[in-house]
Image: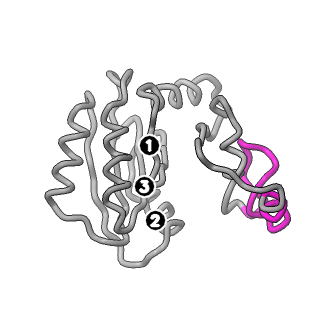
């Protein structure tokens, strides 16, 4: 059993995925945290690339890499299938193009989660995301987006992703 599972769905985006994993590999403040990182792949990653990822994660005190290649495409299916594969008490899910620009990002997420037993999810700050007012309105009208950064949409398929770019603190 791990303290934390990190899931990254991907498909043929090795450059983005590499930057993401490198940004995870330099995280600090994780001395007492056991981490499994699961790559859920719709494409194919060569073994030498996976070995490099293992080396990068080896910089963390207690981290391991698992690779799962699935046959049915789709990011939502990847996230869903990952739930049956992980064993962490807490789950972090990153897109393959996410880059953690704060070396304490994961530590802060864990602390925010631990600060209140009623919290079931924690969101971070998404830099570079933006949308027009009409795009946000359309997202809400189609139930694909909520009005609050920390709430799921009515469809439960998405949250308020387009609002995250305006946030300055974890929510």
Residue 11 left/right relative to 94: left
Task: Please state the horizontal and vertical placement of residue 109, each as a whole percent of the image.
Answer: 53, 31
Queried whether the magenta region covers residue 85, the answer comes back as: no
Q: CA distance from mark 1 to mark 2?
A: 20 Å
Task: Please state the horizontal and vertical placement of residue 56, each as a whole percent of the image.
Answer: 23, 40
Work out whether residue 98 or residue 5 is closer to the camera in this orientation and state it: 98
Q: Earlier in the sequence, mark 3 or mark 2?
A: 2
**On the image, numbered disc 2 is attached to which residue?**
78
Q: Secondary structure at mark 1?
A: loop
Work out whether residue 126 or residue 87 is closer to the camera in this orientation and state it: 126
**On the image, numbered disc 3 is attached to which residue?**
96
Q: Earlier in the sequence, mark 1 or mark 2?
A: 2
Give the residue at x 31% y 63%: 68
Q: Nearer the viewer, mark 1 or mark 2?
A: 1
Give the residue at x 81% y 65%: 138
Q: Quadrant of the N terminus?
A: top left
Give the residue at x 66% y 43%: 165
Residue 167 left/right relative to 40: right
Q: Quadrant of the C terminus?
A: top right
Q: Nearer the viewer, mark 3 or mark 2?
A: 3
Q: CA distance from mark 3 to mark 2?
A: 12 Å
Residue 146 left/right relative to 9: right
The magenta span reads 136-155
Question: What mark, if any, has residue 99 been given in the picture?
Answer: 1
Residue 76 left/right relative to 6: right
The secondary structure making up most of the magenta span is loop
Mark 1 crowd level (few <14, some 14–19, many ≥20, 10 Å Cα)? some
Task: Please state the horizontal and vertical placement of residue 83, each as a whole percent of the image.
Answer: 46, 57
Queried whether the magenta region covers residue 150, the answer comes back as: yes
């Amino acid at each position: 059993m791990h303290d934390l599972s990190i899931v990254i769905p991907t498909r043929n985006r090795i450059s983005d995925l590499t930057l993401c994993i490198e940004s995870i590999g330099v995280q600090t403040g994780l001395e007492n945290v056991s981490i499994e990182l699961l790559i859920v792949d719709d494409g194919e990653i060569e073994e030498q690339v996976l070995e490099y990822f293992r080396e990068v994660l080896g910089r963390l005190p207690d981290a391991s890499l698992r690779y799962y290649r699935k046959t049915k495409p789709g990011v939502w299916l990847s996230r869903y299938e990952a739930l049956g594969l992980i064993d962490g008490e807490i789950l972090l899910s990153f897109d393959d193009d996410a880059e953690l620009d704060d070396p304490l990002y994961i530590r802060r997420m864990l602390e925010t989660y631990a600060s209140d037993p009623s919290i079931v999810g924690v969101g971070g700050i998404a830099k570079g995301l933006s949308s027009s007012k009409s795009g946000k309105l359309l997202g809400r009208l189609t139930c694909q987006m909520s009005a609050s950064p920390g709430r799921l949409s009515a469809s439960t398929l998405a949250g308020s992703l387009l609002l995250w770019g305006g946030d300055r603190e974890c929510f």
